[in-house]
Amino acid sequence: MSSSHKIMNFDAIVVGAGIEGSATAYQLAKQKHRTLLLEQFPLPHSRGSSHGQSRIIRCAYEQTFFAHMVLDAMEMWKQLEKETNTNIFKNTGLLVVEDQAPHKSYTQHLNAVKAVRKPYAVYTGSEINDKYAGAVHYEKNYKGMVELGAGLLKADKALRSFQEQFKKFGGIIHDEEGVIEVIPGDIITVTTNKGQYRTKRLVLAVGAWASKMLKPLGLNFPLQIMRVNVCYWKVKTPGVFNGFPCFIDCSAEWPIYGLPSHEYPGMVKVCMHGGHPIASPEDRDLCKNQDDIKKMSQYIQKFMPGLEAKPSIVESCMYTSTPDEIPIIGTYPNYNNLAYVCGLSGTGFKLAPALGKVMCELVTGQPLSHDISPYNPDRFYRKQDTYTDSTSNYRTPMKPAVQAKSKL
């Protein structure tokens, strides 16, 4: 870089303007830190994992610690609605079902809802069929539970609200600006394709680009990027799905989930919680595998007779998943002013307000509002035979001369 270019200084920089990065930047700016939010693509865009119009929000999880974080996030979503005068949450309820005894996953979801004292109702398979007659038909061995306070988030409005409020708090967004170098230190240097910055605090929330950003920093995590087919299925008879909730069927290896008509009138969003592994986020549109669509079509033919068995619209998204489908949160060795969040595993959107708050607390040295030990990457490196090879060592500090040259 030419010496004529001015190096700009910030209290904090967040890399990645998806939902996690935007929520983190919002929190930092709200606390009056002069914050820069960097995004490699023109905003808005559909290249990552935060686009689209709907996401499920629920306390029903197999892990209770998720339920507690969602409970906090729900209140923060309400606060964002008030601040921006925007309707983000729609209460639809959430139906959780499972077919085979002992109904382990169903019971775990139910216990999480009980743990945070949210209202719910339980049903047999026959009762579910009666309640949603014409929409679904589950076998008698099914068990079901409806989390009454769950629903959907209007994802595009949620993301835009965080970014707009961030700017109102004095934050600065630079899109079309990819990071090409990060040098940790008490003062962190960030070089992009357009300039150079120095900051006291840095948060990396780069989604599917996490490995490209973190590996040059010596942080090597077991992350798998997946291309996800997002499918919309036409309702056969208008009105049959009126009042139908969001739902999750825990029976299969990859759970099936769905949301009531929102994006496209007369269609229901039904997807598989999983996708097709890809080597790089740039490969997303090269993957043409539709095996999951065939499985979803078979599921709909069997259990959702109210829908056409061929999707009318197929869109794409990406998951970046960990082996246990629990996100990774941590700070750089010896420098707690550099934090990262990655491997959201398809569950990060609903958690974003609470995760953003935690990331802000991490880099500003505040007491943490949530126990983040379940998200610690150490968990993988205590299981050497399962998750690591002889060359992986995420605790290797980056020498000052080594540069992170992952373009974001």
Image (cartoon, helix red, strand yellow):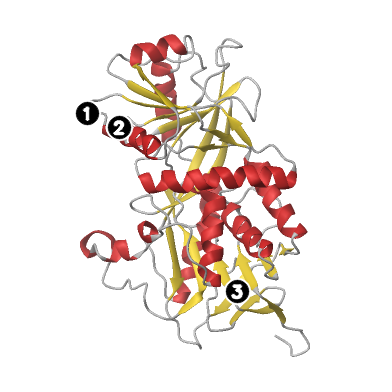
Q: Are marks 2 and 1 in contact (CB under 8 Å)?
A: yes
State the quadrant of the N terminus: bottom right
Q: How far separated are the C-alphas under marks 3 and 1? A: 51 Å
Q: Earlier in the sequence, mark 3 or mark 1?
A: 1
Mark 2 or 1, closer to the camera: 2
For label 3, the crowd category at 10 Å Cα-Cα, with few meaning under 14, some 14 to 19 and many 20 or more, is some
**Residue placed under numbered mark 1 in the picture:** 102
Q: Earlier in the sequence, mark 2 or mark 1?
A: 1
**Residue placed under numbered mark 2 in the picture:** 107
Number of numbered labels in the structure image = 3
Residue occupying image coordinates x 22% and y 28%: 102
Q: Residue 152, percent across and down?
A: 57, 34
Q: Secondary structure at mark 3?
A: strand
Q: Residue 403, percent across and down?
A: 53, 81
Task: Check the image and report above or below for 167 versus 235.
Answer: below
**Residue placed under numbered mark 3 in the picture:** 180
Work out whether residue 276 can be spotted: no
State the quadrant of the C terminus: bottom right
Q: Secondary structure at mark 1?
A: loop
Q: How far separated are the C-alphas under marks 3 and 2? A: 46 Å
